[in-house]
Image: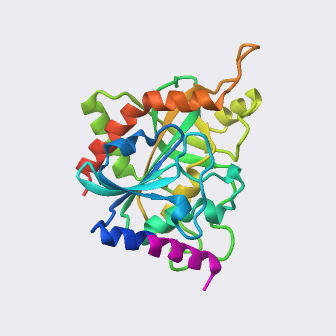
């Protein structure tokens, strides 16, 4: 067996044993970005599995990422939420960055919800805005490079609609009903861990990016490889423009604090969506 696949199955078997003991079958996987772990506070009867206890599992080291699977009831559905993700910039290869997503696929999720903290490159975006991700531009190594894992999906998966149009339509309707303003746009994913230079922000805007970050796309590609519908939201935590004051600096702690302050809107939207999906 491919050692990557063996590692995925070993991790999934460990998690599944705990889920079976608690009579839990997750229907929706949720990946929570920097400062956005508050959603797990709303999960009822939660079962917590620290990443460090799962065989072969990478451990999250980024600011604002606690490193747990939280499984329980949210919006009337059984969910498995990643309280912190794994990033390429942490030094992990892509097969480990995407291992949690593969595990959730083996556990039987039918949808994947992803979130991130992002810089708003679009001049119309402001701190605290929610951007529904409609498309992305990938500047990280593609996680499907290497021998194809045939049991998960085809060699050349289609990416015409990486973010499910039905879920986007539902999100826009529910956001309007809840009075939550939302933007729509394209997420540009770079490796990090440095924030972009002013001219890199300008470049991202020119090529069609509306928000930029250092995550999300590998997990989305991996989910789509297995045919899992994806819904994504970026919380705009800083205005990523190219006209800064001479003393301006981007600060990771500030990003996490800003994401936390805006997280309630994302939590409301995710919960309402869970209540309305089959």
If the image is split into quadrants, where does the C terminus sit?
A: bottom left
Task: Confirm whether residue 34 shows in the render.
Answer: yes
Give the percent coordinates (x, y) of residue 242: 70, 23
* Total numbered badges shown on the rendered structure: 0
Write down the region rendered in magenta.
1-14
The reply to whether the magenta stretch includes residue 85 is no
Which of 194 and 41 lies nearest the eye of the viewer?
A: 41
Horizontally, residue 25 falls left or right of residue 151, namely left
Query: In which quadrant will I find the N terminus?
Result: bottom right
Please tell me which residue is depicted at 71% across the width and 22% down the height of the picture.
249
Left/right placement of residue 176 relative to residue 205 reads left
Residue 24: which quarter of the image? bottom left
- Judge left or right: residue 196 versus residue 176: right
Q: Is residue 7 on the magenta stretch?
A: yes
For the point 35% across and 68% down, the residue is: 19
Question: Which residue is the extreme one toward the front?
Answer: 53
Q: Position of residue 226 (x, y in %)?
A: 47, 69
Report the side of 187 relative to 246 (left or right).
Answer: left
Quarter assignment of residue 250: top right
Q: Which residue appears at 31% of the width and 71% of the height?
A: 21
Q: Above or below — where is 56 with respect to 120?
A: below
Locate residue 168: give its quadrant. top left
Extreme bottom residue here?
1
203 relative to 191, above or below: above
């Amino acid at each position: 067996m491919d050692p990557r696949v063996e590692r995925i199955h070993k991790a999934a078997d460990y998690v599944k044993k705990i889920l079976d003991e608690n009579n839990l079958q997750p229907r929706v996987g949720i990946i929570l970005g920097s400062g956005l772990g508050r959603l797990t506070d709303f999960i009822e009867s939660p079962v917590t599995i620290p990443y460090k206890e799962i065989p072969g599992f990478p451990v999250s080291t980024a600011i604002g990422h606690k490193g747990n699977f939280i499984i329980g009831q949210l919006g009337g559905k059984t969910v498995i939420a990643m309280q912190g993700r794994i990033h390429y910039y942490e030094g992990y290869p892509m097969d480990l960055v995407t291992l949690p997503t593969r595990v959730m696929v083996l556990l039987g999720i039918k949808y994947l919800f992803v979130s991130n903290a992002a810089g708003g490159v679009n001049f119309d975006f402001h701190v605290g805005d929610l951007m529904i991700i409609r498309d992305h531009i990938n500047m990280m190594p593609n996680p499907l490079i290497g021998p194809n894992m045939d049991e998960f999906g085809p060699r050349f998966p289609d990416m015409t609609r990486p973010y499910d149009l039905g879920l986007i339509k539902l999100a826009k309707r529910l956001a309007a009903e809840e009075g939550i303003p939302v933007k729509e746009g394209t997420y540009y994913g770079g490796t990090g861990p440095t924030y972009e230079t002013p001219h890199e922000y300008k470049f991202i805007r020119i090529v069609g990016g509306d928000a930029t970050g250092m995550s999300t796309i590998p997990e989305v590609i991996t989910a789509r490889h297995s045919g899992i519908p994806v819904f994504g939201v970026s919380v705009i935590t800083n205005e990523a423009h190219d006209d800064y004051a001479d003393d301006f600096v981007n600060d990771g702690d500030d990003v996490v604090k800003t994401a936390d302050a805006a997280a309630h809107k994302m939590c409301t939207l995710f919960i309402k969506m869970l209540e309305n999906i089959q």
